[in-house]
Amino acid sequence: MPDTRRGIVAYGAYVPYSRLQRSAITAALGTGGGRGTRAVASYDEDATSMAVEAGRMLMRSAPDGLTPDAIYFATSTPPYLDKTNANVIHAALDLPSRVFAGDVGGSPRSVNAALRAAIGGGRPTMVVAADVRSGRPGSGDEANTGDAAVAWLIGSDDDGPLLAEWLGGASATEEFLDRWRLPEWNYSRVWEERFGEHAYLPLVTEAAEAAFKECEIEPGDVDKVVIAGLHARAVRGAARAAGVDGAKVVDDLTTVVGQTGSAHAGLVLAATLDDAAPGETIMVIHLVDGVDVGFFRTTEAIADQQPAATVAAQIEAGNDSLDYNTFLTWRGFLDREPPRRPDPVPPAAPPSFRSDRWKYAFVGSRDASSGAIHLPPQRVSVKGGAVDEMEPVPMADVPGTVVTFTIDRLAYSLSPPTIAVVIDFDGGGRFQCQLTDADPDDVKIGDRVSMTFRRLLTADGVHNYFWKARPIGGSE
């Protein structure tokens, strides 16, 4: 194989719109909570849908024509077991069937396994990580965790200009009981904090010393340090244990987003790269069931990067007025009376298979003679009546305008009321769908919207993924 550098060719991050003020927990329960906010996946989001959004962010800034050879999806909160969640991401990104898609599940350390495989491979590979984290009401996990997704396109110089070159790293692994969750539980249990600190910090020292030696880097050569982990006390002591200047540790975003599990080290690294200058050496220390330490060095290409939406912009655009009772409902801890409507019907496999490019990738059809766009795709044109003269037209990244809307307070929803909008897309095409991440009182004709991949409902254990609209804002 040719001697080429490998590293980050492109990246994307997704922080959901909703925020819960930690003080709302204290106000409701008289305990728990704290200061700041945590990011909250909406009732129509899960790890897979957030991973799709992060992947879309990545693809918008990736080199033209570059398609990953594989997708690895790392999550500790998979929407499906015994079914590959990465296939949904593959379909939503409208990737060719030759692109491999696979899940790397388990603990949040699984993302490091995916990154190791991608960096050690010889082909461009997308690594996506996402989690929906929570804990029992009033617990530290409820307040201090958060929800987010991040995507990396790992490749070589042959795939496009590297934004950050991978310099190397090292790991330290030891079996100990820090936190655990059985498959049927919806929250984790955690051992006493001082024990975890005692177990982690020697591993930080071991992995850091080995990484410095392998990469021939001195602690003083490091410009920025990213430290992430679910054990807060160990994270606070990691810089000293690694022998690096604590002043170089970047903000880990836990005050405004929370600890986002599988996605968190990548999310903080993405925020760091958003503002990085060429030639910076960035050290990443990840504490999860062991310690992984790695080094990246930014290249000249970082100065010209244009992220689809920076992490800071998405954080700034969030809405921190989420009601605590609504949060509990979305998380399944508060079983509220549903609308007096029949239960939703699960989507059937055969029609979903036949229309997968429409359902997952939002690909419509365009009449080759008249240019009329049809959503959903049709065989017969609405202009001129031409039959079977259509060409596919991807619409997921096309913005549109609300031409009319209605507020439905009776439709089945975990977060009533639902907002139904009719959208005229730029360049043609009209479609009716739901509007999400919006206040019903603020919706008006003429609003600009974009499409977002969401989970419409779950019935009989089947997740019905499709597309909704959202106001154009911080995640664009």
Image (cartoon, rainbow, N blue to C red):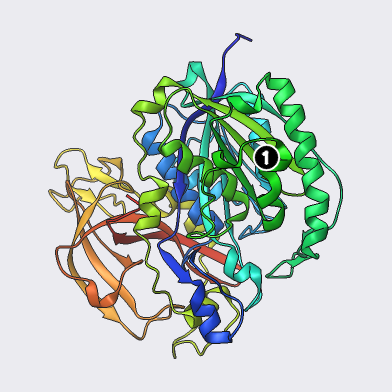
Residue at position x 65%, y 70% from top? 140
Q: What element carries label 1?
A: helix
Image x and y of residue 189, in percent: 76, 68
Q: Which of 358 and 77 is in front in this view?
A: 77
Image x and y of residue 162, in percent: 47, 23
Image x and y of residue 460, in percent: 60, 72
Q: Nearer the viewer, residue 72 or 270?
A: 270
Quadrant housing residue 134: bottom right
Residue at position x 47%, y 22% from top? 279
Residue at position x 82%, y 41% from top? 173
* Residue situated furthest right in the rendering: 175
Quadrant, the N terminus:
top right
Provide the residue designation for mark 1.
112
Image x and y of residue 418, in percent: 34, 76
Quadrant housing residue 276: top left
Q: Is residue 347 above or below residue 50?
A: below
